[in-house]
């Protein structure tokens, strides 16, 4: 059974989908802890699903590296096979990448390398494209530039707002994430190989 630590900043709706998938006895991975960089709404999922939570408040540390070191310490206690950034709205420092790479993955609401960064949905809308997407990547020291594990196109429809478009992207992100966790656990995806190529 693969042990997952999931890090969030927001509502954790993608995390919820992963928690629901892992209720199936056949699912080869379990979320062992949920962490956040702030008092994220999604931390309530810990109580709902009986999973421990921790918070490493970004603002409590003098700089990104110090925050990253505290995050590493918390995450390591759970001895995870895979660390998932599921809406963690912070760039993680190099120390975190070094500690967990290549078993550190990130969901992103755009078809990378298009629209990286904190506003993938807003930026796609502003660019006037007629399709965007969802991506799952291995985290490296770039901004959303790591190796792509899976991605899928999502149409932008006339009249879309950031919220309607994001709501159309998220179910795709969830499907990609759950499938990738399965594939990684079953060795159908080899993150080491993906990172080396
Ligand atoms: C997801 O769309 C995720 O891809 C995005 O935040 C959302 C979290 O939603 N992450 C980023 O934009 C990272 N750059 P959730 O809290 O409802 O799961």
Image (tube, rainbow, N blue to C red):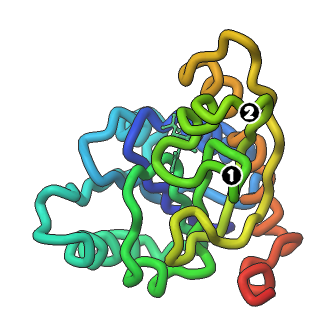
In the displayed structure, does residue 193 sit left or right of residue 116? right
Q: Which of marks 2 and 1 is nearer the N terminus?
A: 1
Q: Cα distance, mark 2 to mark 1?
A: 11 Å
The quadrant of the rendering that contains the C terminus is bottom right
Task: Please name whichever residue, 77 or 102, is drawn nearer the observer in this view of the structure.
Answer: 102
Image quadrant occupied by the N terminus: bottom right
Q: Dot 2: within a 10 Å radius of its alpha carbon, few (fewer than 14), some, or many (20 or more) residues?
A: few
Residue occupied by mark 2: 129
Residue that protrudes farthest toward the right in the picture: 188
Seen in the image, is 92 located left or right of residue 30?
Answer: left
Q: How many labels does the image show?
A: 2
115 is higher (above) or lower (below) than 144? above
Q: Is residue 26 visible from the viewing direction of this image? A: no
Residue bearing mark 1: 114
Q: Please rate how many residues cluster around mark 1, counting C-alpha atoms within 10 Å: few if below 14, some from 14 to 19, many from 20.
A: some
Nearest the viewer among 158 and 59 is: 158
Looking at the image, is 180 positioned above or below residue 126?
below
> Residue 91: percent from the left, percent from the top?
40, 63
Disc 2, disc 1: CB below 8 Å?
Answer: yes
> Which residue is pictured at 50% across the width and 77% down the height?
141
SS for callout 1 = loop
User: x, y (%) of residue 171?
Assistant: 71, 32
Residue drawn at x 43%, y 33% as measured from the top left = 11
Q: Residue 155 carries which label?
A: none
Q: Looking at the picture, how far across and down is residue 31, in whole percent?
A: 54, 55
Res. 172 visible in picture: yes
In the rendered image, which quarter is residue 146 located in? bottom right
Q: In this view, does 1 lie above or below 37?
A: below
Q: In this view, does 111 lie to the left or right of 116?
A: right
Which quarter of the picture shows residue 157? top right
């Amino acid at each position: 059974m693969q042990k997952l630590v999931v890090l969030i900043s927001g509502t954790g709706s993608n995390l919820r989908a992963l928690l629901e998938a892992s209720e199936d006895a056949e699912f080869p991975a379990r979320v062992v802890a949920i962490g956040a960089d702030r008092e994220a709404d999604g931390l309530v999922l810990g109580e709902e699903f009986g999973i421990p939570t921790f918070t490493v408040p970004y603002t409590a540390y003098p700089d990104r590296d110090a925050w990253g070191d505290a995050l590493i310490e918390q995450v390591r206690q759970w001895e995870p096979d895979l660390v998932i950034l599921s809406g963690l709205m912070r760039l993680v420092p190099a120390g975190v990448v070094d500690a967990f790479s290549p078993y550190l993955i990130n969901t992103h609401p755009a078809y990378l390398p298009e629209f990286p960064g904190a506003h993938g949905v807003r930026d796609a809308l502003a660019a006037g494209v007629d399709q965007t997407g969802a991506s799952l990547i291995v985290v490296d020291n770039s901004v959303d530039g790591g190796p792509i594990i899976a991605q899928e196109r999502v149409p932008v429809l006339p009249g879309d707002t950031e919220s309607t478009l994001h709501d159309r992207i998220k179910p795709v992100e969830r499907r990609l994430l759950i499938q990738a966790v399965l594939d990684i656990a079953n060795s159908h995806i080899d993150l080491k190989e993906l990172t080396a190529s």
